[in-house]
Image (cartoon, rainbow, N blue to C red):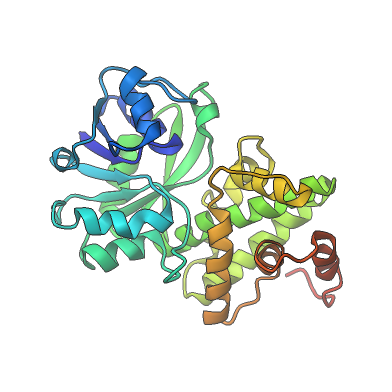
Amino acid sequence: MKISIIGSGRWGSFIAWYLDKIGKDVTLYGRKNSKRFKELLENRKNTFLTLPDSIKLTTDLQSIFDADCLIISVGVQNLRELLNEIKEKVDINIPIILCMKGIELTTAMLPSQIVKDVLGKDKKVLIWVGPGHVQDFTRGIPNCMVIDSEDKNLIKKFADSFSSDLIRFYFGTDLIGNEIGAASKNVVGIAAGILDGLNLSSLKGALMARATREIARLIKKMGKDETCAYGLCHLGDYEATVFSKFSNNRRFGESLCKGEKFDKLAEGVYTTKALMILSKKYNVELPITKAVYRVIYEKENVKDVLDSLFKRSLKKEF
């Protein structure tokens, strides 16, 4: 199977490494002006891994479209621009697999919706989501992930083809539900970091329980399968997001709480704002998301926001 990958960051380079490891023919594309890709071109290494010589590296965008599938691993806020750049080049029959988690700020669209908006509603699109950090995978620590699509045959094809002793893939059952779950877990990661910054890490259990219910309500209001919130895309990804030292979203929340600068990408910052748009659109209350929004965007005092959550009216848990 010939696979082309767009995106040479932490996750894109790992996907190239992983798929090559399980015997796929892999080409990794990066932009000429990308510092990260320049590093890979010079010595085939980055902070996280070393790419074997069997992986082809290219800055020629035109050369990557003769493939059995195209994997895209870029920030969600940059996805539309990329798709507009390649829409005249990519064959309608080549499946696109999205390896990203987030919601577009300007439209509140999910990644698969952006693809169909730009490339057409008939475009074959899948998502690859779930827990795991590059630092763990490259040390041989296995995990479970999800592949989902509106095309059930494509789900089975790629889950079967991509599974190994390192990653066990499950078949997704609701594309949009899994995308919402995957995106929103980053907001929970920020909330967890805030608790760490306040030395209130013992509240993470309550955070996980209530956040999962919150996102399940949103998914249900959107007419999708609320059980996605309890699966690998969301609850199953909490360990990697809420506790791990490698989680950029958790680290962002902790740094925010402590008044420290954090300069790495924390996709949950954008997702928080996008979720508030969906909250209004679907008339569903998202108290934890709103609390994170108040801290990030309205610059409210963290302790006051947390206190307001505790003072909400008492109710049944379920």
Place residue 51 in its image quadrant. top left
Horizontal side of 177 relative to 302 (left or right) equals: left
Would residue 61 appear left or right of 307 to someone viewing this image?
Answer: left
Q: Nearer the viewer, residue 84 or 4?
A: 84
Classify 157 as above or below 116. above
Q: Is residue 282 visible?
A: no
Q: Nearer the viewer, residue 250 or 69?
A: 250
Question: Is the C terminus in the top left, top right, bottom left or bottom right quadrant?
Answer: bottom right
**Image spot of residue 146 (x, y percent):** 44, 47
Q: Residue at x 47, y 70 (%)?
A: 224
Asked where in the image residue 79 lies, by quadrant, the reply is bottom left
Q: Residue at x 21, y 66 (%)?
A: 120
Residue name at image x 50 percent, y 62 percent: 180
Going by the image, does 37 lie left or right of 293? left
Horizontal and vertical percent position of residue 145 = 47, 42
Tell me which corner region of the image, top left, top right, bottom left or bottom right, holds residue 248: top right
**Do we see residue 269 in this rendering?**
yes
Q: Quadrant of the N terminus?
A: top left
Q: Is residue 62 above or below residue 221?
A: above
Residue 203 point in image, percent of width and height: 81, 52
- Picture layout, residue 315 above or below residue 114: below
Query: Looking at the image, is 283 positioned above or below residue 9?
Result: below
Residue 265 in the image, given as x and y percentages of width and height: 53, 46
How many numbered circles does the render carry? 0
